[in-house]
Amino acid sequence: MKPRIGITPSPTEDQLAHGTFTRYAMAAPYVEAVLAAGGIPIVLPPQDDHAAELLEMVDALLLSGGGDVDPARFGDDETHPETYGVHALRDRFELGLVAVALERDLPLLAICRGTQVLNVALGGTLIQHLPDQHHGPVAIIHRQHERGLASDDIGHDVDVEAGSLLARATDGAPTLGVNSYHHQAIRELAPGLVATAHAADGVVEAVEVPAATFALGVQWHPELMFARHAAQLAPFAALVAAATVRRLVARA
């Protein structure tokens, strides 16, 4: 059987004629990317107390993008006016999933918000709003739609650390062209994490957990790019490959 990849969705509030409803929405490109990489996507709706049981049912975990992590989770006393989409249950759920996944050495891919969740779960902090709180050697607009770019356009390049998990997944490419749809980023890197890609303005664009067999976080959205840029399927292919090995070993 193909490996099963658990994906976290985003909570949304939908106002309809017959009432307001909370829904857990899964953007189709995540599913399409996992399918293209050879995995079976399974949506994991936010809930308390069941992280261990849910991860028993999958061979790898994918943390998706979405709203911001509660600043209180990383020690900020104030919430920036641009911080949005904070959802307490999602925070609790995903932080719990990360803890269990790393404890079990379950393959993990974190995308955009997911990378920030991974950093916070391990004790790191975040920049709440890049335009106000980060000033690098060059200026990069990390919300590329503000520049009129499409979601599968390249917004900027990232420099990839040689020999890193990301470099190995992308056949040693020293730079990657990526899209950019975030206003937050890693401030202080958590213990146990290493940064393996940066933008020209110094923003951390990829991280990994050296102690894990496969734990990679990317700040961009490869699921929106892989259909046009083949190299962007690499993180999903590497995740599925790691999940396949784990599944085979577990059943040996």
Image (cartoon, rainbow, N blue to C red):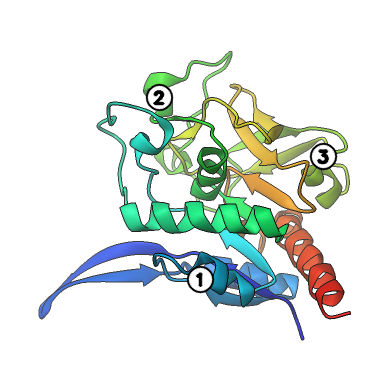
Above or below, 207 relative to 23: above
Numbered badge on residue 131: 2
Task: Kindly state the secondary structure of the residue where label 3 is placed.
Answer: loop
Residue lying at the far top of the rendered structure:
137
Above or below, 231 relative to 186: below
The residue to which callout 3 is attached is 164
Residue at 80% in and 53% down: 213
Numbered badge on residue 171: none
Q: Can residue 108 be seen in this view?
A: no
Image quadrant for the N terminus?
bottom right
Q: Are marks 1 and 3 in contact (CB under 8 Å)?
A: no
Q: Which amino acid does label 1 sit on?
A: Ala
Q: Quadrant of residue 157?
A: top right
Work out whether mark 3 precedes mark 2 in sequence or the reverse, and give the earlier one: 2
The residue to which callout 1 is attached is 28
Q: What residue type is labelled 3?
A: Ser
Q: Where is residue 197 in the image (x, y as percent from the top left)?
A: 70, 34
Q: Count the labels in the image.
A: 3
How far apart marks 3 and 2 lie (CA) works out to 29 Å
Crowding near the residue tagged with mark 3, few <14, some 14–19, many ≥20 C-alpha atoms within 10 Å: many
